[in-house]
Image (cartoon, rainbow, N blue to C red):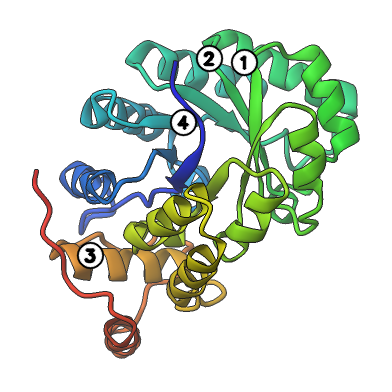
Amino acid sequence: MAKFEGIFPAIITPMAADGSLNEAAYRQVMEFNIQAGVQGFWVAGGTGESVLLDDEENRRIAEIVADQSQGRIANIMHVGAPTTARAARLAEHAAKVGVEAICCVPPFFYRQSDEMIVEHYRVVAAAADLPLFVYNLPQSTGVEITPQLMQKIQEGVPQLAGLKHSAPYLPYVRDFAKMGLACFVGNCRLMLPALTIGAVGCVDGPPNMAPERWVALWKAYRSGNLAEAAAAQEYASQVADLVQPFRFHAIAKAVIGARLGIDCGDPRLPGQPLTEGERAKLLHKAGKIGLGSVSVRV
């Protein structure tokens, strides 16, 4: 059975010049991260622009990640959708093509009762019969998964394995861990303090850009060297500091593309692309903190 702990970058979705999915670039980004030592991927989540992709694209992404990883890492495929039926169909497909787990946001836009949120997760999880990770992102969904609500989900969904906790209140990590759940912290700047209160690892977008830095942090913590882990957290956080509001997708794609020597494209509309001047300034900053080009064995 796959182990769900460590560094799980929330992988970007590279786009071609015409705005379509760039499969070759997707595979190269995956391989770059795998060779850096990550333990898995959070696929087609917020960083992956999932809500801007159609269902066919999400299904193809599930096929790509299962094929490219060849069992070397664990893929947690996001299947969240506005309707339970769509999410369940995506979950069923993800299981068929060989991903190791699924993740899902709660029902969004229309506010639902706790009972209907549990039912949503029950139906989606049953369609895949894979480990299920809840995606706790209230800033975007308008629904916060508190420990109290998570207890209800745990009682009603036997496939529940854990969650990505991206809500602002970090101490909930401790509560989720005490429930026996694999809780990934969704803020890579807070990975080290989250590990000390029970988190099993980190899921976030910036580790895409420099997976080697977060892998070093994970290894230092696991070896018991807290001083080295603290230094690694500071070093890794320099990468996260490149991120600006409303520009994360463009920034991540530009930095990863420059490091790998490929074109990861622009964000899908309404995402905002970088101007040439902004791109030049960004890559200059990236170079100053040591994010140079890398070679990847494909």
- Callout count: 4
Front one among 57 and 35: 35
Q: Amino acid at mark 2?
A: Leu
- Residue 219, placed above or below residue 86: below
Q: Residue at x 51, y 74 (%)?
A: 234
Which residue is denoted by mark 3 in the rendering?
A: 257
Residues at badges 4 and 1 in contact (C-beta under 8 Å)?
A: no
- Residue 240, placed above or below residue 14: below
In the drawing, what numbered circle is on residue 238?
A: none
Tell me the CA gap for discs 3 and 4.
Answer: 23 Å
Mark 4 and mark 1 lie on one chain; the one further toward the N terminus is 4
Tell me the CA gap for discs 4 and 1.
Answer: 12 Å
Q: Which structural element holds mark 4?
A: strand
Q: Which structural element holds mark 3?
A: helix
Which residue is denoted by mark 1 in the rendering?
A: 125
Q: Is residue 46 visible?
A: no
Quick check: 82 left or right of 197? left
Q: Which structural element holds mark 1?
A: helix
Residue 252 place in picture, x, y as percent? 38, 65
- Residue 258, placed above or below residue 269: below
Tell me the CA gap for discs 2 and 1.
Answer: 7 Å
Residue 257 in which image quadrant:
bottom left
Residue 251 place in picture, x, y as percent? 39, 71
Q: Amino acid at mark 3?
A: Gly
Residues at badges 3 and 4 in contact (C-beta under 8 Å)?
A: no
Q: Residue at x 46, y 52 (%)?
A: 218
Q: Nearer the viewer, mark 2 or mark 3?
A: 2
Which residue is denoted by mark 4 in the rendering?
A: 77
Which residue is denoted by mark 2 in the rendering?
A: 130
Quick check: 117 left or right of 208? right
Tell me the CA gap for discs 2 and 3.
Answer: 33 Å
Q: Which structural element holds mark 2?
A: loop
